[in-house]
Each structure stands twice: as structure tokens, then as C-alpha cells.
Amino acid sequence: MSTSLDCHVQQGALTIIELHGIDIYANYACKVASRYQEYRETYDALGSHTTARVYATIQASLEPYERDRRATQVAYIYGDPVFSNIVLDEAARKVTFFDVRSQQGDRFTTMGDVCYDLAEVLQSLQGYDHIVLTGEEALTKLSQAHDAQAQLSAILRPEDRLFLGTLQRTFWDFVSDRYGDIVEPHELLMLVASLLFSLIPLHRPAFQPLFLHMCVNILEHETACPV
């Protein structure tokens, strides 16, 4: 994890970003609002009251994050470092990254907010990849589960959640050591919730209630898959 995040270069980033007129907040509140409005029917089908509440809570966090300029501006971010975009070749001791997102809104750029990359990594540590890489057997169990909680349990077993919890503690130790008070844990969790919420309509219908339930869990328990 540290290898991918060490590419963040703070020095001179603010001047470069201002010079090029890059809005490093373009993928936050505005993007979530646009996605919610464009796919409102999809969100409402999952439960209009719940999705509206989650949306409002996320926006209530993202808007002051943008207004108060809370981002940690850097010249380079990956843009989508979830683990399913990373291939590890243990024999060659080589890591390959796919699907690099060098874009802020409609502007192509390597610049961005450190917390965006951190939130993407934390999204994986919340169980995102367990879901998107679900096999056919688990999908069958998913169709038999009676609600989102049971569906999530069909994919993320107690031992999976315990392991993810251990990785999350390691992650938070890394963030504290590397960034100190610059990164606020609650804000980072809200960024994770915004990522999960905005990707709901982009995934297969079987996964949509799971991502929504993960959002609710983050808001209520500060983790997507509590033990």
C-alpha cells in the first residue's frame, strides 16, 4: 500500500493546481449529485427514503469539505486504486496498476486530493472487491438471501470481516503516521460512502442493494461490514 501512496508529491502542488485551474473537488459533491439525479429511478427502487437519507448525509459532509478547502492537494494521484485494479506478480515481485483515472470532472490531469486515493484504498478494505469479484456460487446464495444484510453476509463471512478489520487498523496506523492531522478519519469515511453511493447504478442489479447497505453501515457504524 505504501508503494502506491508514496507517489503523492505535496511540494509545489498548490501552485501547479491553481496555475492550471484544476478543480480537485470535481469528483465529490457535484459528481454525487449528478449521479443521483441521472439515476434517480434506480436509487428510488432500492428504497427512496433510505437513498434520500444517505444522499443528504453524504452531501452534508462533502459540501463543507469543499467549502473549507479541506483537500490535501498533490501533483499526482492514481484516481482508482481499488485492489481489483491491481495485479501482484509475486514471482517477479512486480505490481501492475490498471484503470488509472487521470481526470477531475472533464479535465484530464494527474493532480488531485490525497484523500481521494486513500478513500479508494479504504473502500477495498471495506469489502468492495469481495463483492465485485463474487463467483457464481456466491451469486446463487445472494439470490436466496431475504435482505441486504443477509446478502452481504453471504459474501463477507465473519472471518472475512475480522481480516478486513485487521487491515483497516493497519491502514489507519499508516494514515496517522504518514499524514498526521492532515487527514480526518470521519471525513475519509464519508468519502468512502460517497464512492460506494455513486457507483451503485454502475454495477449489476444484484450488487446495488449491497453497496447501499454498506453506505448505511458506514454512516451508522463507521465500517461497511461490522462484525
Image (cartoon, rainbow, N blue to C red):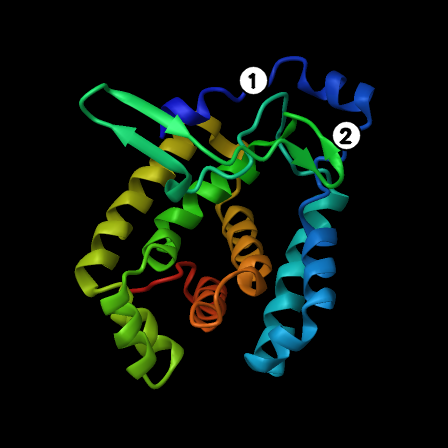
Characterize the local packing of mark 1: few (<14), some (14-19) or many (20 or more) Cα atoms within 10 angstroms: some
Question: Helix, strand or loop at disc 1?
Answer: loop
Question: Helix, strand or loop at disc 2?
Answer: loop
Vertical position of residue 146 compared to residue 25: above or below: below
Vertical position of residue 66 compared to residue 88: above or below: below
Vertical position of residue 11 compared to residue 60: above or below: above
Q: In which quarter of the image is residue 16?
A: top right
* Residue at point 27%, 71% (across, down): 153
Of residues 16 and 220, the one drawn nearer to the viewer in this rendering: 16
* Residue at point 20%, 64% (across, down): 158
Q: What residue type is labelled 2?
A: Ile
Point out the residue furthest to the top here: 12
x, y percent for residue 150: 31, 78
- Look at the image and tell me in which quarter the C terminus lies: bottom left
Q: Mark 2 points at which residue?
A: 22
Of residues 216 and 145, the one drawn nearer to the viewer in this rendering: 145
* Residue at point 31%, 60% (across, down): 134
- Residue 22 is left or right of residue 166, and the answer is right
In the rendered structure, find residue 9 and report the number of the disc placed on it.
1
Q: Which of pointers 2 and 1 lies earlier in the amino acid sequence?
A: 1
Q: How many marks?
A: 2
Of residues 137 and 44, the one drawn nearer to the viewer in this rendering: 137
Q: What residue type is labelled 1?
A: Val
x, y percent for residue 85: 42, 39
Q: Quadrant of residue 26?
A: top right
x, y percent for residue 191: 56, 50
